[in-house]
Image (tube, rainbow, N blue to C red):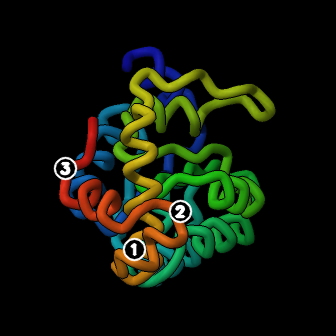
């Protein structure tokens, strides 16, 4: 943490916005980023984040992709319109290649799965342009990635087990057993 804090302390602009509809995660991440030297503003909705960005565009942003009132991608676009040099990291519990590509095309510098470690977030925010990010210290297990994907498809199918099973090409009973279990570590 000290190496990252020293780099943050040397930045001319330390303003950062954290957008997440999960209040405990937002608060915890905000405190961790403040401890590393950022000037953090917290927000829980896309509308509130866009309003804050229009009032004063931050140098950095950590945004959730999927929120109750919209997508974090619209906030990325607003930030980039106000401040093209801003560094944005997207967070999501529903990671897949299509959304990662959309986030990067919108202007995000990295895309991290939730829950993201604060040092990983800071590392992504401060990474040099074009530099490959360091591998995560604590990546999701293959079982967890599979579980997240199934949960996402289940949610997109309106919690319809039969439709989800059809789209995932799996037996309905198998899907019901998976859905009944807790998330793997």
**Quarter of the figure with residue 165:** bottom left
Could you give the CA–CA distance between mark 2 and mark 1, rounded to whole angstroms?
16 Å
Judge whether residue 62 can be spotted in this image: no
SS class, disc 2: loop
Could you give the CA–CA distance between mark 2 and mark 3, rounded to whole angstroms?
21 Å
Tell me if residue 144 comes above or below residue 71 in the rendering.
above
* Side of 87 where 116 appears, left or right: left
Tell me if residue 29 comes above or below residue 173 in the rendering.
above
Residue 74, image x and y in percent?
61, 75
Name the quadrant of the N terminus.
top left
Judge whether residue 79 can be spotted in this image: yes
Could you give the CA–CA distance between mark 1 and mark 3, rounded to whole angstroms?
16 Å
Q: Earlier in the sequence, mark 2 or mark 3?
A: 2
Q: What residue does disc 1 label?
A: 155
Task: Tell me what residue is drawn at x 60 percent, y 33 percent.
Answer: 126
Find residue 182 and name its label. Answer: 3
């Amino acid at each position: 943490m000290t190496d990252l804090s020293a780099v943050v302390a040397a930045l001319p602009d330390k303003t950062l916005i954290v957008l997440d509809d999960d209040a405990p995660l937002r608060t915890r991440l905000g405190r961790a980023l403040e401890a590393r030297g950022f000037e953090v503003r917290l927000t829980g909705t896309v509308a509130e984040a866009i309003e804050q960005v229009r009032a004063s565009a931050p140098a950095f942003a950590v945004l959730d992709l999927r929120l109750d009132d919209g997508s974090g991608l619209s906030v990325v676009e607003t930030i980039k319109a106000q401040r093209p040099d801003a560094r944005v990291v997207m967070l999501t519990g529903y990671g897949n290649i299509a959304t990662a590509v959309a986030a990067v095309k919108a202007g995000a510098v990295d895309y991290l799965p939730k829950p993201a470690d604060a040092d990983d977030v800071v590392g992504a925010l401060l990474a040099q342009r074009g530099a490959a990010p360091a591998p995560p210290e604590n990546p999701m297990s293959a079982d967890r990635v599979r579980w997240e994907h199934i949960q996402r498809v289940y949610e997109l199918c309106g919690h319809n087990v039969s439709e989800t099973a059809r789209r995932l090409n799996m037996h309905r009973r198998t899907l019901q057993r998976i859905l009944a279990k807790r998330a793997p570590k």
